[in-house]
């Protein structure tokens, strides 16, 4: 795991304790007792060597997500850039239960991503019911990989527990009023008062596309024109996800 991620969990985040599961000599029963939300597949993955962890994690993403050719390439580049894919058990204060985070850290120490434990089918079904089955299938599939996902200290992809309460009461765009119920925020940018939202009035494919929404000027993306990377309007959730992962690659290139 790169130094940035190591320092985050050991120092800068202010956690009471952090256990790097691949390094811990702990049984499944002991780990589950410490971290009730720990997924057994994550524990078993951490018994493998680092190269196998990366390979199996990549295979899992591809087995779960409906991925088009272009997104396929972006995801492969993401996993190829990693130095580790592993689980950290985090304790925020003494005597509190640990919670698991899956950490994807980069070889060049530029950044890392961290994801929450996967959702159950029952939880995703409840979320679908909350939004009248509008949510795209690729997003619901991603929830079976991670419930909550973020780069470093970003707010990131919103957890299913937070999504039903994340809608803004009123949005205006170019002097037009957008029905607030048409926007479903699924990602929040830390400190920017901006969101990526599924937009139920735009169906570029058989399912909802997603647009950028800023609370600073109450505007949404011009979703009908321009390239997704320029307008931040994406036809699918996976297209947006690959863009989010590729932002790190762009940052690395700017430093070289």
Image: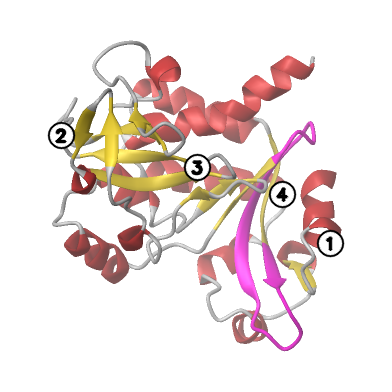
> Which circle, 3 or 4, is nearer the viewer?
3
Of the image marks 3 and 1, the number of the one nearer the N terminus: 1
Report the side of 213 relative to 208 (left or right): right
Vertical position of residue 7 compared to residue 71: above or below: below
Residue 124, label in figure: none
In this figure, which residue is indicated by the disc labeled 3?
193
Of the image marks 4 and 2, the number of the one nearer the N terminus: 4
Of the image marks 2 and 1, the number of the one nearer the N terminus: 1
Of the image marks 3 and 2, the number of the one nearer the N terminus: 3
**Callout 2 secondary element:** loop
**Callout 1 secondary element:** helix
| Residue 9, percent from left and from top | 78, 59
The part of the chain drawn in magenta is 88-111
Q: Can residue 2 be seen at all in this image of the molecule?
A: no
**Front one among 36 and 10:** 10
* CA–CA distance in space, label 4 to label 2: 44 Å
* CA–CA distance in space, label 3 to label 4: 37 Å
Vertical position of residue 230 compared to residue 36: above or below: above
Report the side of 149 relative to 51 (left or right): left
Q: Can residue 92 be seen at all in this image of the molecule?
A: yes
**Residue occupying image coordinates x 33% and y 50%:** 168
Task: Bin the neighbour count of mark 1 within 10 Å (Cα to Cα): few under 14, some 14-19, many 20 and up.
Answer: some
* CA–CA distance in space, label 3 to label 2: 22 Å
> Which circle, 4 or 2, is nearer the viewer?
2
In this figure, which residue is indicated by the disc labeled 4?
50
> Looking at this rendering, what residue extends furthest in the front direction?
175
**Callout 4 secondary element:** helix
Residue 246 in the magenta stretch? The answer is no
In this figure, which residue is indicated by the disc labeled 2?
201
Q: Quadrant of the C terminus?
A: top right
Of the image marks 1 and 4, the number of the one nearer the N terminus: 1
């Amino acid at each position: 795991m790169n130094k940035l991620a190591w320092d985050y969990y050991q120092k800068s985040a202010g956690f009471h304790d952090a256990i790097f599961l691949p390094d811990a000599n702990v049984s499944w029963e002991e780990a589950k007792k410490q971290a009730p939300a720990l997924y057994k597949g994550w524990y078993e993955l951490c018994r493998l060597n680092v190269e196998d962890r990366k390979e199996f994690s990549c295979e899992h993403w591809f087995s779960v997500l409906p991925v088009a050719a272009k997104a396929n390439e972006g995801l492969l580049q993401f996993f190829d850039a990693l130095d580790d894919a592993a689980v950290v058990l985090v304790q925020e204060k003494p005597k509190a239960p640990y919670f698991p985070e899956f950490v994807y850290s980069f070889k060049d120490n530029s950044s890392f991503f961290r994801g929450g434990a996967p959702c159950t089918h029952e939880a995703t079904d409840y979320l679908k019911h909350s939004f009248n089955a509008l949510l795209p299938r690729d997003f619901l599939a991603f929830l079976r990989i991670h419930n909550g996902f973020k780069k470093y200290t970003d707010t990131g992809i919103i957890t299913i527990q937070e999504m039903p309460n994340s809608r803004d009461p009123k949005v205006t765009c170019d002097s037009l009023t957008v029905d607030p119920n048409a926007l479903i925020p699924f990602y929040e940018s830390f400190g920017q008062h901006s969101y990526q939202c599924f937009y139920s009035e735009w169906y570029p494919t058989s399912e909802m596309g997603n647009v950028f929404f800023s609370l600073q000027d109450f505007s949404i993306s011009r979703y009908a024109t321009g390239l997704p990377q320029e307008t931040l309007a994406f036809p699918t959730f996976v297209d947006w996800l690959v863009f989010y992962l590729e932002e790190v690659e762009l940052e690395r290139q700017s430093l070289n």
